[in-house]
Image (spheres, helix red, strand yellow):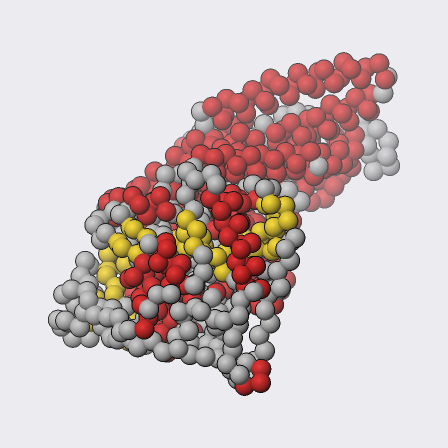
Amino acid sequence: MSNVFNKKIKLFSTNFQGDFTPLSEAKIGEDYVVRRLRTSDENARRLISVGICPDAAITPLFAAPLGDPTAYAVAGAKIALARACARNIISMQTTRRGQIGQMTVKNIHCKCTANAACKICSMHDAPGAVHVRAKANSAKLTVALTGNPNSGKTTLFNRLTGKSLRTGNRAGVTVANFSAAAPANPDITVTDTPGVNALSPYSPEEKYTTDYLTKTPPDVIINVVDCTRPERSLYLTTQLLQTNRPVVVALTMADIAQKQNIAVNTEKLSQTLGVQCVTINRRDKAAADKLLTACRKAAEKWQNKKTDDSVLKNLPPLSDTGLAAATKRRAVATKITAVTFRRNTAETMSDKIDKVVVSRTLAFPIFAIVMWAIFFIATEGPCKTIADFISGTLTPQIQSAATNLLECANAPWLTSLISDGVIGGAMSVVGFLPQITVLAGLVSLLEESGYMARIAFITDLPLSAVGLCGQSAVCLTVGCGCSVPAVMAARTVKCEKLRRTTVSVVPYVPCSAKLAIIACVTSRIFDGNAFVALSLYAVCLAAVAVAASILNKTTDGNEASVEITELPDYRLPKLSVAGRQMLSAATGFLKKAGTTIVVTSVLLWGCRYFTPAFGKAVSEEDSICGVLGKIISPLFAPLGFDDGNCGYAYAVATIVGLSAKEAAVATLTVLGGGTLPAISPLGAYCWALYNLLTVPCIATVAASAAEQGRKNAAVAFVLQAGLAYVFTLIARTIGLAVSNIAR
């Protein structure tokens, strides 16, 4: 066993120049050493978990285009801190990194039952604590994947189980546990847990993972360690080794680390930690089997373990959450990294890309171009051609074939039901499948590339002006795909007040379902004008800012939490991941089209075909839809829904859209007899805007209520309905004024 911890190990140099200075005033490109943290214990533990602790080396890399936040290199990772947070970190400038502080390692024995030295675990709890050994079943085994956010944990889960869980190059993708059996080893159940920096109840995901590992512990823990940032990852490792569960370390990103000239001594790392370490390489097809085999061996070894031969006996008790304990734990992680990893400090390709992508002059233009390109690709070109073919050619042919087939039944109502209700309603939204699928794939590529975190970085300051933060930008961008995972991803926002505000404003962002409304209006009314779509998105973003400002002033909560944005290295996006996301989006959309939308379309057909007395309607106005529409249409008349004397149709579609936004388009198609009911371009624009801004689908409402409570969710949605009405009314007023001037 290695004796590396039986001697003093020097960490950093004491050769300083200059006085103590807040980190917020540190010079870009200069090396500093953290000396003191002037913040609450909770925030200090949060900073220590990502590597910012006394005696830690830290280097300011670059500032956001607007000057705040600033990106720092610390513990082998790149993180962003707001100036307000960096102001409370006292540092000293150093000319060279070398040795600050010393630490003598002592063997610490915990006292378990009968006041005897613990012979079976390294968990140093209070005297009298009873530690129960994990009882692994040779036939069945439960394995939990645990690691830092963005460490490749979910990707490894997919590789082990053959599943296709949502992955992304950002924190907070996995927001709940997912379990599945390994195909090659069906007796082994693998569970993917939310990414955490430490086992401490600082954030919802950290509490979730901590409770899972302690209250319903697995037989074996697979600790996912990112080879490109080992010092950051090994802090969590030191805690997992004290959970009284066998641990296997999976070293991910090995191929990327090799390209960055980062070398890892796997044998020495295994010897130092006292556990088996397995390198996971994308090219090694047998790596998954090796990892599961290592888990089986670890469980068997743990059952037969008689002595604690771990060299990490110097760690403080796991129950000790004090700052001194956290600092000591960080020092241990640093030492392990120093003796098992060798890093080349040369500038990486990711660093070179950041000089352009987040530069003061190019950051926002690049962001605007990227977002414009995404929505242009999703609404124009081949996507529009396919959509036009489905709606203009394929749908009429299917309806005609169905009509001819049902003529022999001599039942006009049945023919109308199948042709107009079922086929017309379903195909009206299926026509937008290409746009929705492509948008999901493009958002996935954005996540995979690492650019999503840069969006949070460059938008942190402007968003903070309205009561949001950079992490909110990530949630808002994810909301372009679906609001439900975007609402759940808000768990990565540590401040409770900011988290609730983010959850409340995410539904203002047009999701893929709302894209059907945008595509419908732009393609059928404005001849595919992409700038109309962009203007709708712009108004929605303005509504986000207004709603966030109102909620920030009316929502209770502490704003003093530390918000840390990790900036992962850029990666070449995997087309396979984007393909899975596209398939998932298409499947979910078609499932809606085949269930919710079909049922809605049939009900609407019945309301359109029959009178309130259940007789056949002679005209549209005499039908149930016509009667109900006339009752509610005055409410929407000021918004221009009745510009074409078909206000009832657009009013009914708006109400139906509360179940699923795609159903609003299907409703208009059914009520319009296969086409949109007559309406002016301004009226169509206002209808689309109101439906984009108003209360979202039922699934999003449920997710929002679960995340922030029913009362807060109800207040947020009442505000949303009111703002939707006000914004639409303003848009109509401006549109009428412009048209009058044009005349």
Q: Position of residue 500 (x, y in %)?
A: 52, 62
Please say whether residue 259 is visible from this viewpoint.
Answer: yes
| Residue drawn at (36%, 78%) of the image | 106
Tell me the quadrant of the picture where the C terminus can be found.
top left
Q: Quadrant of residue 31?
A: bottom left
| Number of numbered discs | 0
- Residue 658, horizontal then vertical, whole percent: 65, 46
Seen in the picture, residue 614 relative to 197 is either above or below; the reply is: above
- In the rendered view, would you say 174 is above or below 551? above
Q: Residue at x 24, y 70 (%)?
A: 10
Q: Is residue 52 visible?
A: no
Up-down: is 363 above or below 624? Answer: below
Q: Nearer the viewer, residue 326 or 663?
A: 326
Closer to the camera in the image, 452 or 210: 210
Q: Residue at x 35, y 43 (%)?
A: 255
From this view, report whether residue 580 is shown above or below residue 78: above
Question: Observer-nearest residue: 2 or 279?
Answer: 2
Left or right position of 525 against 23: right
Question: Residue 374 at x, y = what percent?
Answer: 42, 36
Residue at horizontal 57%, vertical 59%? 300
Image location (x, y in percent) of residue 478: 48, 47
Apparent side of residue 23 relative to residue 417 in the rendered image (left or right): left
Q: Quadrant of residue 531?
A: top left
Rendered-image quadrant of the N terminus: bottom left
